[in-house]
Amino acid sequence: MTDSASPRQAPATYRLLEHTADMGIEAQGESLAELFAQAARGLLDILFGTPCPEGGREKLALAVEAWDREELLVAWLSELLFVVQQRDFRPSGLSVDKIGPSRLEATLTGAFAPEGSVPLREVKAITYHRLSVFETRGCWKARVFLDL
Amino acid sequence: MAVKVEQIDPCRWRIPRQGAMRTEGLVYASRAMMDRLRQEQALEQVRNVATLPGIVGPSLAMPDIHWGYGFPIGGVAAFDVDQGVVSPGGVGYDINCGVRLMRSRLTADELRPLLPQLTEKIFQQVPSGVGSCRPDLSLTKAEQRQVLLQGARWVVERGLGSAEDLLRSQAEGCIAEADPEQLSERALERGRNQLGTLGSGNHFIEIQYVEELLDELIAEVLGLFPGQITVAIHTGSRGLGYQVCDDALRAMLRAAKKYAIDLPDRQLCCAPLNSVEGRNYLAAMACAANYAFANRQVITAAVRQAFEDTLGLGREALQLSLIVDVCHNIATWEDHRFEGRQRRLCVHRKGATRAFPPGHPALPACYRSIGQPVLVPGDMGRYSYVLVGTERGMEETFGSVCHGAGRVLSRHRAKKAAYRRDIFAEMAREGILLRAAGRATVAEEISEAYKDVAEVVQVVEQAGIGRSVARLRPLAVIKG
């Protein structure tokens, strides 16, 4: 199962949630792959605002594992956060290539630290607070909060 | 289920025991604060903490309480050494985020003409902003190990501070139980070049002056006088601490299942204090706490150097000495008298400050007569307070007070409120020089985003859990 998401292509089906000190993401998708891709776009929105940084053709493969779908969402977003904040990778596109209840494989497209692309804000971590991933009437939904 | 809250007196509110709660909640707040609190999730979080095994006394919340993740920000909870648990979510990601306060011999009038130069110098010497790092201070593996084991002591031994700095820091700037073997490669990598950096968000360096003494006798012991220049530094363990918490949470999710601990919120995942998982976390947490102590010590040295270079004065003339360094996010082993008997407890403070009373053996001799000093920073446009701990605080809150003003506006709402305003000019009109790495941070950190810290301190004072000593007004603020 594959779902690609480029900030200038697929429509966004996520929204940012208000939190007194931090921020959250509520995402939805027709498949689990789309849901996870949308949640990732929400994270990139928090980090860079919209539109996300453009350009770059380097590919970065990511794979994460977890015990269940909720933890997989945290693991996935944490990995994305790590490559952005620690490895200075600036994704302009992403695709969730394979996903199951406990494993995800994805490819990021972008560039390492292009000029003028410092994140707007620091995200400390992806939390498990009020975390949810569920399917209802053929639509996948998720909610996750970040520590800023 | 709505959280039931009963008013005890003008500044205390009880959340009665119900459902899975093992104890009641106790929230310090004015009526106006409580009205606001009822509209967010923080009270629910106080209730959730009360369900954790081995909790001793109430699940507490200081008056700067607001919605956090897992624990509320402003939450304090103590756990029994044998029956209790340790929860990384009860410490937070920025392990030992904390604040230190320094005093000087200078007055505001003396410094004012050089303030822009000094502020710029500090801004240049202390990297701030998103992902700030110091490649010039990049640690070897062996050096990093020593930082994790020794905390601020390692920095002082390299000539970047004094024995007095250590003496006046909580735990003398080093928590003994640290074990670097518990840290992942990723945590170590993230910490390798961030020592001596401020970061972003609510972290800051502030040059302040003493606007008013509220208790002259205690202020004298602290060496404070009206018009005096002070410096506050607020930061923590940076990416290393975030990674330690992140790694620990994954382990604790498994541990909670293994030990059959029911969790009302996954972020509260925990393990018994006497389990392998619990001990491993505390050993990793101590490493991150020590890294944070070292970080604030390196920044202190950079600030001192900036003062010396800008003013052309030596250390003796400036006497930029530490008043206190306190932790905001930490779990520490403490001995407390509870219900008539002495107990060994693991006290979690998540956005709260230890404030031990006069006479407490953990205090350095210089503070034993007055109690532990605490800096309670307000927002960047108003003021901060110096407090000391009290006996009543020791009895009611395990010797804890608030850690700041507490947010009231979400970042989105703060940004909206700041839209098209020149916050730098507004601050300048108030006589405050603002220097920041990013405009987004400034918008999110505007004064209105926070409670008025005076109201927070008033509740602390009224409840008798802390005593006000002095009010400090910012002259220059450096934000990430």
Image: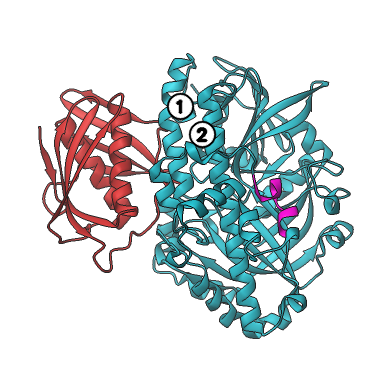
Chain colours: A red, B cyan
Where residue B297 appears, as percent x and y from the top left, is 62, 60
Could you tell which of marks 2 and 1 lies nearer the N-terminus?
2
Where residue B21 appears, as percent x and y from the top left, is 58, 18
Q: Quadrant of residue B362?
A: top right
> Is B108 in front, or is B417?
B108
Label 1: state its secondary structure: helix
Residue in the image at 35% along x and 36% along y: A144
Residue B243 shown in magenta:
no
Amino acid type shown at disc 2: Pro
Residue in the image at 72% along x and 26% along y: B344
Distance of label 2 from label 1 (alpha carbons)? 8 Å
In this image, B20 relative to B165: left or right? left
- Tag 1, which chain? B
* Label 2 sits on residue: B88
Task: Return the mark for residue A15.
Answer: none
Where residue B8 appears, as percent x and y from the top left, is 73, 29
Q: Is residue A17 above or below residue B374?
A: above
